[in-house]
Amino acid sequence: MSTVDQAGFEQVRDWLSQRCGFNFPPHKSDLLRQRMGRVLRRFEMQDLNQLARELTMVGAREVQLAVMHAASINHTYFFREPEVLERFMDTALPTFQDRPEFRIWSAACSTGEEAYTIAILLAERLSPQVLKRASILGSDISAPVVERAELGVFPSRQFAQTDPHLVQRWFKPTGINQYRVNPDIRDVCTFRRMNLKATPYPFSKPFQAVFCRNILYYFDRSDQAATVRALYDVVEPGGWLVTSVTESVRHLGSLWEPVATGLYRRAS
């Protein structure tokens, strides 16, 4: 690794930790350098020392957003970790499915596959009519991926783990090897740019369930704990938290009560 811009590298890494909660330990240094290389090329910067200076300058919002986007992990696909999704549908959904309206949040939604997956699962498990009573928020720190989520167009590779019948039912071909989500699924989902480290979260109404999957392990322990506490505060009593199979919140001093792998409940 080059040490010419090591000071700038450390400053960028610290900025990402403080601003976004992203944790890049030494064994991920090459990965971070690779991703920041995209930013350097885009803005025609010489090295990470220059990038570090630009990050703190007045009017640096475009550079800041580019750094956040490059550092964030945007690998996702439809129906990821189906065992967790089934557990949510079997255990959590029945506790609020008869409400006249209910709210679900897909935190760190990337390009929207998770939010749309949830909407499809609701329609399949209950009926398409349930979509009129449901509201699904998808949020991500990266502005470009939020824009892609709002567009609702996905390449065929994002459906590698999806039943072809579901693709046929809920999507329409558009262009070469691309599919657009149907309006009834699209309309139930709203997407916003949001930083999970910016707590407390600015919601006036509580959620019945929050999905926060495959993001906590990119935070250090203190940011993990703060995020989990903030999620607890925006879920109604008896509401639910869904994580991935590889993420547990039990070690974070959390008030969430474990129900099953990847599924937690707030005390009633």
Image (cartoon, rainbow, N blue to C red):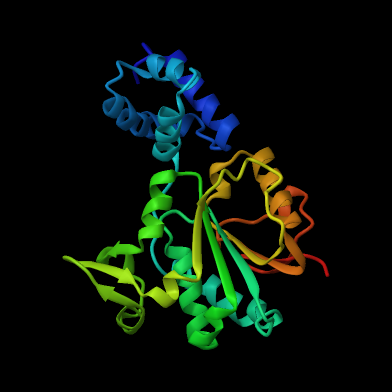
Kindly give the residue lying farthest to the right in the view shown: 268
Can you tell which quarter of the image residue 97 is in?
bottom right
Residue at 55% over, 58% down: 213
Question: Looking at the rendering, which quadrant does residue 256 occupy?
Answer: bottom right
Q: Is residue 111 left or right of residue 256?
A: left
As rendered, which of 12 and 152 lies closer to the eye?
A: 152
Name the residue: 39% across, 34% down.
66
Q: Splitting the image into 4 quarters, where does residue 143 fall?
A: top left
Vertically, is 248 above or below 178?
A: above
User: How many numbered discs?
Assistant: 0
In the depicted structure, whether residue 3 falls above or below residue 174: above
Q: Is residue 196 above or below residue 244?
A: above
In percent of width and height, residue 39 lies at: 34, 29
x and y percent of residue 150 in the render? 40, 58
Outermost residue, left side: 176
Q: Residue 11, position in %: x, y?
A: 50, 19
Tell which of 74 and 59 is nearer to you: 59
Query: Where, quadrant-wise, is the N terminus in this rendering?
Result: top left
Camera-nearest residue between 25 and 40: 40
